[in-house]
Amino acid sequence: MNIKIETPIHSNGIAVVLLKKINGIYNVLLMKRATKILKDMWCYIGGSLEHGEQAWQAFLREVKEETGITKVTLYSSNTFDQIYSPLEN
């Protein structure tokens, strides 16, 4: 008997890396943070899921809110492990 056990993933946030291929080279969009947390640090796009929102919906919303970009193709990477949380540690 082969039983596959999956660990449920609970997430309350998303991290987005935007890539654009220009002249055969992939470029990554980084944003300089203006908020209290990570102020003046260069980061990828990220945010919290709103009530009832799925991760892909949060992805689209955060990208539009932070960049104004609406035409994107979504790819998923491996799971993201957060090793430090300033609110919990």
Image (tube, grey):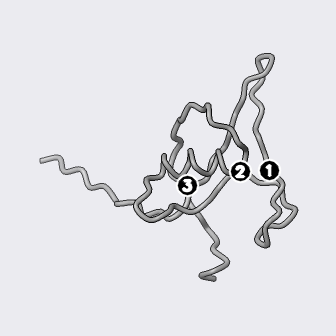
Q: What residue would you read off at disc 2?
A: 66
Q: Which mark is nearer the camera, 3 or 2? A: 2
The answer for how far apart the CA atoms under marks 1 and 2 are is: 9 Å
**Image quadrant where one finds the C terminus:** bottom right
The residue under label 3 is which amino acid type? Phe
Q: What residue would you read off at disc 1?
A: 31
Residue at horizontal 63 percent and vertical 47 percent from the top: 16
Determine whether 81 is above or below 88 in the image.
above
The residue under label 2 is which amino acid type? Glu
Residue at horizontal 47 percent and vertical 62 percent from the top: 11
Q: Residues within 10 Å of mark 3 (few under 14, many from 20)?
A: few
Q: Residues within 10 Å of mark 2 (few under 14, many from 20)?
A: few
Circle 2 SS class: helix
Do residues under tags 1 and 2 come within 8 Å of each other at their CB atoms? yes
Q: Position of residue 75 (x, y in %)?
A: 53, 35
Disc 3 or 1, which lies upstream in sequence?
A: 1
Q: Residue 80's mark?
A: 3
